Amino acid sequence: MADKPEVDYMALREAFTTDDHKISEARIARHVIERVKLISRHGVPYNVDGEMDRAMIVQAIANLLIELGVEYGNAHKAEAIMKLVIQLSAEENIEINRTAIPVANGTIVVDPKDGSYMFTPIKQFSPYRLSCNFEANANDLTWFNRWLEVLYEDDHDCFQEIMGYLLLPVTFGQYAFFLIGEGGCGKSVWGCILRAIFGNSMTSAETHAIENDRFARATLENKLLNYDDDLDGAKMTKTNVFKMLVTAKQPIQGERKGVDRFEFTPFARLCGCGNSSLSSMFDLTDAFVRRLLLIKAKPPIEKSKIIPDIEERIYPEASAILNWSLQGLKRLIQNNYQFSISERSKALVQNVREESNSIIPFIADEIEFGAGFYVTSERLIMEYKTYCHKMDFIARDSKLIPGYFKDHAEQLKIRYVNKVPALRKRGFVGMKVKSDTTQKKPALDLNSIFTKEG
């Protein structure tokens, strides 16, 4: 064992003490900042390798204090110095390179026009860094390909594009990505694969918590993705933050303990696994559902064929998976960020659309459109509730039903009026419920003679 180098305690004390022989917390703080080339943003320390472990920095400061001969109150003093480090190194903004992929051994630079890329061993500063190396010749995907069998073959291209998309801090794709399937099918290994590649450039807050909790949202700052390993099957009561995260056009609010509430523009993509997809309780627009890209996993295989430690076998293939993902990114860029979505995935999203909004199947099954038809709002609500009860669907609040038809009046070619024909009640012209057999399509277009005021 090599001998520990001797420490010149006299020189050490001289460097960090004032003229009156008191230890200078400011000098120690500046030393830490310069030594590791540290900057901070909203209370989080970063260096060239990405986010730093705050506890490790505090421990290093405490050890330094011991070497300086401080015998009492080291923990409190180390924390005080750490706060000073954060304050002195604070940056108003951290520039993000949208075409660079910081990897453990350098930087991959991607051409935004055709998806081609080149590697340099130079580490550009970034608030995040992947945990795997780039190795140009890495191509052994033996165990990764075994795991990939949990997905249907016509979803492989899309999944490859998702993996590539997650490498860059861009949100052009406008999707959140979820693997859906029965328990025990192996889908959750995806989280282990992501962790092997992305390391601490990803986080793992619950999707529902991100919507409702500013502390959870704060964990997304300067992260490439958030992975939810067990999607909560409960319907989301709010979807505003979810939609803002997927679109990532506006800043959102976050909060950390001991730090004032702040705003940041996220680029973390939302990913996860679950037995069923996210769905919304009250969002009747299509804005929530069309942001979902769902991939269905195959049914569970026989227990005798399960490889219990497959994730451990996949870890050494991280660099090869990175190369595989880069090919997916290249194809995605060349296709203008249009994913190769299978018909199965499209059908899954449509199912969520109908389950989230029972008005859609109600329209398909119970409504007939045509010039001269009419229905009162009262009749529409009654028929809708009867339909939901019959089909065992969740019925929306009565107040939301007329509003939905008003919002989609142009699309449905209908018109809201204060007085429908003869009945003198509020409702819609241009549509009727199919059970109303009293109405026939007239020769005269009644719709054309009604004004918006009725």
Image (tube, grey):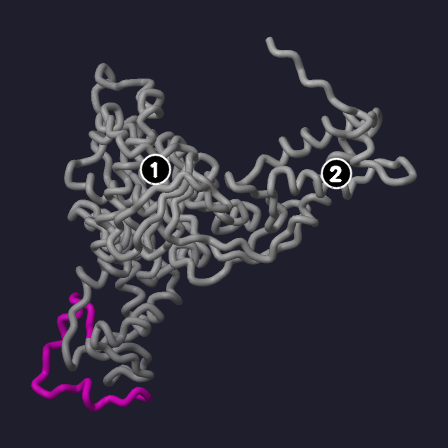
Residue 340 locus on image (x, y percent):
19, 49
In the image, 219 versus 38, the foreground residue is: 38
In the image, 420 versus 198, the foreground residue is: 198
Identify the residue shown where x is 79% and y is 29%. Answer: 11
* Circles 1, 2 touching at the beta carbon (< 8 Å): no
Looking at the image, can residue 355 be seen? Answer: yes
Residue 121 locus on image (x, y percent):
41, 38
* Residue on which the image places disc 1: 274
* Residue range of the region highlighted in magenta in the rendering: 431-454
Picture quarter with the C terminus: bottom left
In the image, 264 versus 74, the foreground residue is: 74
Task: Say which amino acid is labelled 1.
Answer: Gly
Which of the labelled discs sits on residue 28, or is there none? 2
Q: Tell me if mark 2 has few (under 14), some (14-19) or many (20+) residues whose alpha carbon lies within 10 angstroms of its own.
A: many
Distance of mark 1 from mark 2, alpha carbons? 48 Å
User: What secondary structure is the magenta-colored segment mainly?
Assistant: loop
Identify the residue shown where x is 26% and y is 24%. Answer: 143
Left or right of residue 307, residue 90 in this image: right
Left or right of residue 71, residue 274 in this image: left
Left or right of residue 219, residue 152 in this image: left
